[in-house]
Amino acid sequence: MDANEVLLLGLLGQEEMHGYKLHEFLEHELNFVSDLKRPTAYRLLEQLLHRQLVERATEREGRRPERMVYRLTAAGQARFETLLREQLADAERVIHAGNVALLFSDRLPPDERRRLLARRRDGVAAQREVLLSIVEAHAPGSTVRLALQHDLAHLDVELGWLTRTIEGLKGECSTSGVITLVAHDPPRRTSSPGAGSAIASGGSKANAVHFSRV
């Protein structure tokens, strides 16, 4: 939610926009940083209006129909700068949805597991190729290139991990038994002056959690 708020406030801080132009920009120019959909964006704009972070006015150009234009307020600029600093320094833990499938992947035959991971690797490689061409189309040092390079780095790590994992699974045989997970207290977030939020580990002893294989 806060990332979407920063996105809308940041765009309106660059220039005032009517709703259609704003959503066209989100859909066609910034889809690499956000999957914000039109209904969600309109709801968020209404919330920002209610909180007086943006304002709305009616304008007309020539004989065209009237349209609503959104502008950032002084309160909105202050809110944007606060969120920007927080999010730029935030080392938020990322939960990868694919890890759930990896957890239970040994329920599949070894050959099929390797084949599916290879398909995933090919998909990541294709994404990387497309993204690299987009990165190279932007000027070095631009913030757009910086954001794209961040995504590219994640794809590089994923591609390398998949390649090593598939290679390591060669010759693997099916096993049976019990999956044992070591469950720790979830990390808690702490704050340090000037450094945003940080992650601290829990203090209680880890507990073993067992899942019986079917």
Image (cartoon, rainbow, N blue to C red):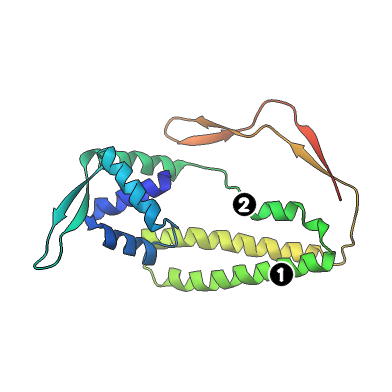
What amino acid is found at the position of numbered circle 2 in the picture? His
Q: Distance between the residues labelled 2 and 1?
A: 18 Å
Residue drawn at point x = 57 percent, y = 62 percent: 155
Percent from the top left, x then y, of residue 131?
49, 69
> Which mark is on residue 118?
1
Image-quadrant location for residue 127: bottom right
Quick one: SS at disc 1?
Answer: helix
Residue found at the very far front of the displayed protein: 65
Which numbered circle lies on residue 182?
none
Q: In this view, does 103 lie above or below 182?
A: below
Residue 133 drawn at (x, y percent):
47, 74
For the point 90% across and 62% down, the residue is 173
Looking at the image, tell me whether mark 2 or mark 1 is earlier in sequence order: 2
Q: Nearer the viewer, residue 138 or 75?
A: 75
**Image position, residue 123 (x, y; %):** 62, 70
Q: Quadrant of the rendered structure where residue 65 is? A: bottom left
Pointer 2 residue = 96
Does 114 sit left or right of 18 as displayed? right
The amino acid marked with disc number 1 is Ala
